């Protein structure tokens, strides 16, 4: 009989306000980017939409203040999830990222991996979009040792992350890197999302960001133990098993400080 897995440890950073979430997030991204560039010569990052792009605003200035060259030409940006709409649509995660983070950031266009918008018509399915995006993801990963250096994700008051919603069949998808969803409980209904195979086995580090009173109840249910760290506002936490929500199911295999939540509520 195999012994039970040890408790999964992570780190929680509590910011005093929504506007204060960006500073610790930027420090984490800068550290991860610096390590990736020095170790592998490139930096790959998966990004979600929602309120997340606004937390990334000003990241370029934070690199300048830290005296670190981000080498944006060495970045590869993939989408942690995307709504199956054109990138000009107000619901597009890529549109939000372009407007709130990527504008003025010199990442080469060919290093930004959006969905194939030619597949959004009636002649194609959401599954077709997911399969095409998996091919794009594999192309991106071929430059990064088949690993994503960092995923920066949000989470909802229902515990979802990416487009991985509670009690949905795609939570059990373990073969594909990208899955499709036709009936998202949040509009728009058609989406694609990275799977847990990518988030847990092919990602070096994950950061969750959230702000608002609706986030507190979820955090209290995904963390079993919370212990104050040596610095104010930083806590060592242990994840609840089994995870009650999709956001709690994201656990990079390296463990420890590879999973960090930066929140304000």
Image (tube, rainbow, N blue to C red):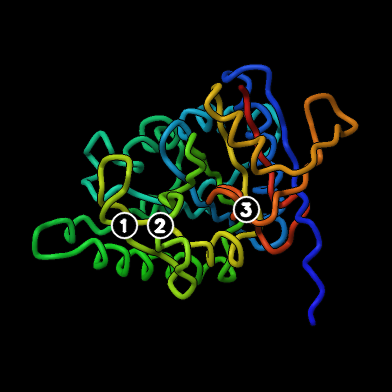
Out of 223 and 48, give the one closest to the viewer.
223
Q: Secondary structure at mark 3?
A: loop
Decide which of tag 1 and tag 2 comes sooner along the chain.
2
Tell me, for residue 181, which label it has, or none: 1
Q: Position of residue 165 (x, y in %)?
A: 43, 49
Q: In the picture, residue 2 is in which quadrant?
A: bottom right
Q: CA distance from mark 3 to mark 2?
A: 14 Å
Q: Circle 3: is it few (<14), some (14-19), or many (20+) Cα within 10 Å?
A: some
- Mark closer to the chain start, 1 or 3: 1
Q: Is 44 placed left or right of 83 in the picture?
A: right
Front disc: 1 or 2 = 2
- Residue that appears at 73% across and 62% down: 254
**Residue at 72% from the left image edge and 49% from the top image edge:** 239
Total number of numbered discs in the rendering: 3
Residue beneath disc 3: 243
Question: Tag on residue 125?
Answer: none
Mark-to-mark CA distance, 1 and 2 = 9 Å
| x 68%, y 40%: residue | 28
């Amino acid at each position: 009989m195999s012994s039970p897995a040890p408790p999964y440890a992570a780190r929680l950073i509590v910011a005093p306000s929504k506007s204060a979430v960006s500073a610790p997030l930027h420090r984490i991204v800068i550290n991860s980017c610096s390590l990736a560039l020095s170790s592998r010569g490139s930096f790959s990052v998966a990004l979600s939409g929602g309120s997340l792009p606004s937390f990334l605003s000003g990241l370029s200035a934070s690199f300048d203040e830290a005296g670190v060259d981000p080498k944006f030409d060495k970045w590869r940006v993939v989408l942690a999830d995307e709504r199956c709409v054109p990138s000009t649509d107000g619901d597009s995660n890529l549109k939000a990222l372009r407007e709130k983070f990527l504008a003025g950031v010199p990442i080469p266009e060919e290093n930004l991996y959006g969905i194939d918008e030619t597949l959004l018509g009636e002649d194609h399915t959401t599954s077709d979009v997911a399969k095409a995006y998996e091919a794009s993801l594999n192309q991106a990963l071929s430059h990064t040792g088949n690993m994503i250096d960092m995923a920066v994700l949000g989470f909802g008051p229902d515990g979802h992350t990416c487009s991985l919603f509670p009690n949905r069949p795609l939570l059990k998808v373990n073969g594909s890197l990208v899955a499709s969803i036709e009936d998202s409980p949040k509009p728009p209904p058609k989406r694609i999302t990275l799977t847990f195979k990518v988030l847990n086995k092919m990602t070096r580090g994950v950061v969750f960001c959230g702000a608002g009173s609706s986030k507190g109840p979820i955090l209290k249910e995904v963390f079993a133990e919370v212990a104050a760290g040596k610095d104010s506002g930083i806590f060592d936490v242990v994840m609840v098993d089994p995870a009650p929500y999709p956001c709690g199911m994201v656990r990079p295999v390296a463990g420890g400080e590879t999973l960090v939540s930066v929140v304000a509520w």
